[in-house]
Amino acid sequence: MASPEKTSPTLKYLGQVDYEPTWRQMQKITDVRDENTPDEIWFLQHPPVFTLGMNASSEHLLAPGSIPVVPIDRGGQVTYHGPGQLVVYPLIDLRRAGLGVRDMVTALERSVVDSAAEYGIQAYPRADAPGVYVDSKKLASVGLRVRRGCTYHGLAFNVDMDLEPFSRINPCGYQGLQITQLRELGGPSDVELMARVLAPHLLRHLGFAANNNQLFSAD
């Protein structure tokens, strides 16, 4: 007997929201959710902020200047978020969805690869360094936290942003790593458009139905 179709997550486009309150809300949802709590995927942007993963070394934070630095509870080293970057936070119950952590990372990476391909851009993941690259330059970063069997944090996809702050860090702990973005590669500059392009790819790679009638909601 075939298993019932998984219920697709609610997709929410939140616009530009401050980093720390958003992170705390993800934690709260994860702490109180149960087996009946619907999954959600948030699409958003953040004001400028550097975030340090749990095992991050401060030596990779070179010259933050006036940009806030927030130590957080995801894996990985230091990264930068800012306007013009599409951030995707999947709040998914892995057990209910029949997914492992590697499945989630792969789905996030492949959704960027497929989205870039729609604009003739050949992007690829790397086995030795999570994320998505074009010609050895990093286009998107992945950093997850799993707690109580559920994910939060997620993906940062550079669309059309000021890349200068990346020069103030060793991105993801890699000295000299070059950063790129969709607009420079010939893709669009509209972050909300890219959220709508990426969403069905991500749902498909996670094994959910891509419902064309799903609307992003900020509620």
Image: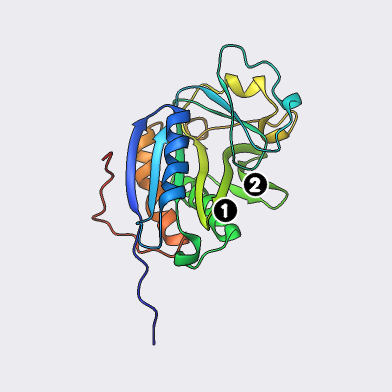
Q: Residues within 10 Å of mark 1 (few under 14, many from 20)?
A: some
Instruction: State the count of labels.
Output: 2
Residue that sits furthest to the top in the current view: 66
Residue that sits furthest to the bottom in the current view: 1
Q: Which residue has dot 1 on it?
A: 105
Q: Earlier in the sequence, mark 2 or mark 1?
A: 1
Residue shown at 72%/34% (left/top)? 173
The C terminus, quarter of image: top left
Q: Could you say which quadrant of the image residue 72 lies in?
A: top right
Label 2, label 1: how many angstroms apart (C-alpha)? 8 Å
Return the residue nearer the eye: 148 or 178: 148
Left or right: 108 with respect to 208? right
Residue 130, label in figure: 2
Return the residue nearer the eye: 214 or 158: 214
Residue shown at 35%/76% (left/top)? 4
- For label 2, the SS is strand
Which amino acid lies under the numbered mark 2 shown in the image of this protein?
Answer: Pro
Residue shown at 46%/36% (left/top)? 24
Left or right: 58 with respect to 206? right
Q: Residues within 10 Å of mark 2 (few under 14, many from 20)?
A: some
Q: Which x, y percent locates residue 51?
A: 59, 30
The N terminus, quarter of image: bottom left
